[in-house]
Image: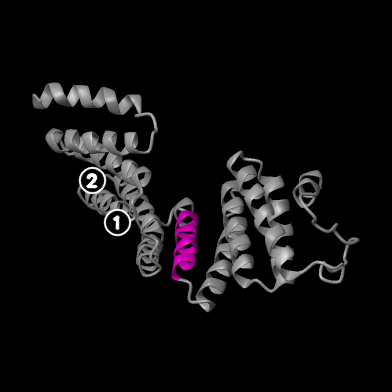
Amino acid sequence: MGILDKILGRGKRRKLPEEGGKLLDAGWTREELREAARDVVAMARALFENHRLNDAETLVMRAKVFYEEAGDRDGVGTCYRYEGSICRERGDLQGAQMAFGKSLSLAHSAKDHARMSLCESGIGGVLEKQGDSAGAMAAYRRAIDLAKQGGDFAHASICHGLIADLLGRQENYVEAQHHYREGAKTAAQANSAAVMAECLQGLAEMYVRTGDDARALEALKAYEEAVRAVGEPVDPKALTLMEVLRQKVGS
């Protein structure tokens, strides 16, 4: 509980009540609960990214209690979504599907298309791990439609990339190219150079697989430009491939 105490010790935060006690009864306001929950979720995300799954799960569960007491259904849905990601990473696919399903239900009740999209893509990832490629693809397609309805074009682009990755592994390179192109186009709408770069690098690989070296080189040039735009280093493998393609294409 040391991490939680450290987070809640900032500013003029109130202390946690005794085990089983209600935070509102201990003098917390609903806004204080929401603020604390947001900080706890941010820390949980950092722990998750560092593969500290048990610690991340502990904090997500605590944040969910804060949001529930604050009456913040959107916040509760966010916690369920993170719980789903943790379960999926751990290999508890049934638990992941249940958590994403609860988050999706709350987002659907709120008619929040952007949040629904995040849940659908999470479900797609679970189905993919279960070997249900068709189900995963359907979930990713739903996620794209919902993301666009919700104005989250960056996430729509990511989902195009997820479909393209799946198609590439199935050796359906032409369809994969289509989704990488759509992903790059959608990322441009979102002004997300980082996501665009990922799609362009994937697109180049698919062009190489089909022997279209000229288009692969053009895609890699666009990838390099997008990466440099966000100040990130260019993948050395991509630079090597560009040199090989330049020699083959003669440009």
Depicted 246 relative to depicted 60: above or below: above
Q: Position of residue 28 (x, y in %)?
A: 80, 66
Q: Which of marks 1 and 2 is in front?
A: 1
**Is 89 situated left or right of 39 in this image?**
left
Look at label 1 and name its amino acid: Gln
Residue range highlighted in magenta:
113-126
Q: Which residue is drawn at 39% across and 33% down?
A: 232
Q: Where does the C terminus fall, quadrant-wise?
A: top left
Q: Residue 200 colored magenta?
A: no
Q: Going from the N terminus, do you reach mark 1 or mark 2 first?
A: 2
Residue marked by disc 2 = 173
Residue marked by disc 1 = 189
- For the residue pair 39 and 123, the one nearer the viewer reads as 39
Q: Residue at x 33, y 36 (%)?
A: 227
- For the residue pair 187 and 237, the one nearer the viewer reads as 187
Depicted 79 relative to depicted 56: above or below: below
**Is 175 situated left or right of 115 in this image?**
left
Residue 240, picture quadrant: top left
Look at label 2 and name its amino acid: Tyr
- For the residue pair 74 and 39, the one nearer the viewer reads as 39
